[in-house]
Image (cartoon, rainbow, N blue to C red):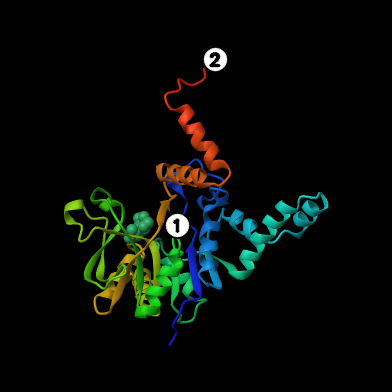
Amino acid sequence: MTTTIRRAVIPAAGLGSRLLPLTKATPKEMLPVGDKPVIEHTVRELVASGITDITIVVSGGKSLIQDHFRPNPALVEQLRADGKQEYADAVEEIAELSRRGHITYLDQHGPYGNGTPVLNAARNFDNEPMLVLWPDDVFVAEVPRAQQLIRAYEATNCPVLALMPMRPEDSQRYGVPVVKEDLGDGLLRITGLVEKPKPADAPSAFAAIGGYVITPGIIDELREQTRRWYEHRTGEIYLTDAINAYAGSRAVYGQVIQGRWYDTGNPADYLVAQFAFALAHPEYGPVLRRLARDLEGHPGIDTNP
Ligand code: G1P
């Protein structure tokens, strides 16, 4: 029996429509947060958590992701020849990350819905559990979020969902777990997820935040959903439906993640993430804090008097 997790999937085929026009030419996964594109934060988190096989599921218009991680020896050579060692090292480090995480890319095929990229990637991962991380969350945590999920899997050998405490008024943005038992250290036994309930109907005060340990049993449920979709050609393939179908008769857990979570998938939260990372930067942070203080109550400079 497999006792740990080495494989991960990042579904990155979405249109990023909530961030248009920023995402008209730039994939949302490539927007910067701090000094790195969003997806590099996720890949670093996975590699730091011992993941050795990362599949990024893409669609047309996402080639910048591949360009970002692909080695570029000509650029490195040019930078070294120009004496720009620091930049050359930074470029090489990204390629090294891709090598360590053994990143491969897969075109998404199949019906609409967030279960489809997971099912696509599962074909490469014969019957092994895998991590699935949405591409628009960034975590700052002492123990990486991926590592926290892997530990919960190692303790339970069951599917695990990443959870965070949620404000009641946010329930309509997330899947909200039905909690059966609190096992301590943030590990919860859950019996399913209610998608985007009204605050009054929310079964708990946690949100599922787009990080999952998916086991072969859930892949079987996705396969079954997809088979039915091809029979009737209606509806969508959702991971939540597969998790709920599985949880009907088998154990599923939630792990409350320790750390700070930044959603980058919509303009307001994306700005918050950028601002927080800028303020935390060792060199620019103090400067920006000073600037923010100076700007407070400042009437602004009229450049068109
Ligand atoms: C999906 C999931 C939902 C989860 C959310 C987190 O919803 O279905 O359970 O809370 O991701 O980002 P979406 O935001 O894709 O509608």
Q: Where is residue 292 in the image (x, y as percent from the top left)?
A: 47, 33
Q: Position of residue 70 (x, y in %)?
A: 66, 61
* Residue 54 rendering spot, x and y as whole percentages: 54, 69
Instruction: Give the class, few, some or many, for how many residues have Cα within 10 Å of label 2's Cα (few <14, many ≥20).
Output: few
Relative height, residue 109 to residue 25 (above, below)? below
Q: What's the CA distance linking mark 1 and mark 2?
A: 42 Å
Disc 1 is placed on an element classified as strand
Q: In which quarter of the image is ligand 1?
A: bottom left
Q: In the shown orientation, is residue 299 left or right of residue 155?
A: right
The answer to whether 281 appears left or right of 272 in the picture is right
Q: Where is residue 252 in the image (x, y as percent from the top left)?
A: 30, 74
Q: Is residue 219 visible?
A: no
Q: Name which residue lies at 55% across and 73% down.
A: 53
Question: Which amino acid does the dot numbered 2 rest on?
Answer: Asn
Residue at the limit of the structure toward the right, as seen here: 81
Q: Which mark is residue 139?
A: 1
In-image side of 139 versus 198 (left or right): right
Is residue 207 positioned above or below 19 on the image? below
Type of amino acid at the residue the image marks with label 1: Phe
Viewer-closest of 255 and 72: 255
Q: Identify the residue shown where x is 37% and y is 72%.
A: 222
Is any atom of residue 129 visible in this view?
yes
Q: Residue at the far left: name it.
A: 200
User: Which of the 4 quarters of the picture holds residue 197?
Assistant: bottom left
Mark linked to residue 304: 2
Answer with mark 1 or mark 2, whichever residue precedes in sequence: 1
Front residue of this view, candidates 134 and 26: 134
Q: Judge: label 2 CB < 8 Å from ligand 1.
A: no
Q: In which quarter of the image is the N terminus?
A: bottom left
Q: Do the residues labelled 1 and 2 touch (CB within 8 Å)?
A: no
Q: Quadrant of residue 118?
A: bottom left
